[in-house]
Image: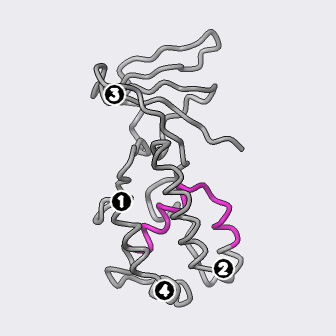
Amino acid sequence: MAERKILYKTNVLSEYITFIDIGSCDKHYDFLPLFDESQTCYNDWYQDFQLLSIGTQILTLHYYLLQHNSEGYLPKELNDRISKNIEVLNEFNIRWFDPSAPFFNSLDLNWDNIEDEVLKAQENEHGIRTEVEFNDGSIIKFLDEDDTIPSFYVTEKEYEELKNSIKSIIEKLK
């Protein structure tokens, strides 16, 4: 399946940069696909976790690292696997997130009121937005018929690094 791409620029005078949509989920821990040892075994959770979008995976791992590093509760099996790989996971966390909050370090448009920030939009003949300008002057051009805004995005340049990094981390948690 092809990755969804958008063009994004920070203001009218800047150049467009191609970003890839890596997916998202609600940032509140109640909505994350967390491992619950009373509901399923680790291997079943792990198999399901591998199938999620990269955005959901990284947000979930970020949550677990915040819990682990603050000595919050983690199921024993998951805690053991994270502990064995803590250096790699912390490097990943520092690279992609604000260390103290669930703010993604690339293009994070995954927040509840993002639609309220739309200043103006252009639509095609089917009513689908083709371009959106935000109150801060940034602009998105949609390259397909999907005009969904809320998500995490990385530049094309960053995408392979992120994809390989998350694949490696998930393999370490096996």
Was residue 49 drawn as part of the magenta stretch in this picture? yes
The amino acid at mark 2 is Gln
Q: Earlier in the sequence, mark 4 or mark 1?
A: 4
Q: CA distance from mark 4 to mark 1?
A: 20 Å
Q: How far across and down, in percent of the image, does residue 64 sit?
A: 44, 74
Which callout, 2 or 4, points to the residue nearer the camera?
A: 4
- The N terminus lies in which quarter of the figure? top right
The amino acid at mark 4 is Asn
Q: Are marks 4 and 1 in contact (CB under 8 Å)?
A: no
Which callout, 2 or 3, points to the residue nearer the camera?
A: 3
Going 51% across and 64% down the picture, which residue do you hit?
Answer: 165
Q: How far across and down, in percent of the image, does residue 107 sit?
A: 39, 43
Residue under circle 2? 39
- Residue closest to the eye, 107 or 156: 156
The amino acid at mark 1 is Phe
Going 57% across and 26% down the picture, which residue do you hit?
Answer: 143
Q: How far across and down, in percent of the image, does residue 111 sit?
A: 41, 45
Q: Earlier in the sequence, mark 2 or mark 4?
A: 2
Residue under circle 4? 79
Q: Are marks 1 and 2 in contact (CB under 8 Å)?
A: no
Q: In this picture, which residue range is highlighted in magenta? A: 47-65
Residue under circle 1? 97
Q: Which label sits on residue 138?
A: 3
In this picture, residue 108 sits left or right of residue 4: left
Q: CA distance from mark 1 to mark 2?
A: 29 Å
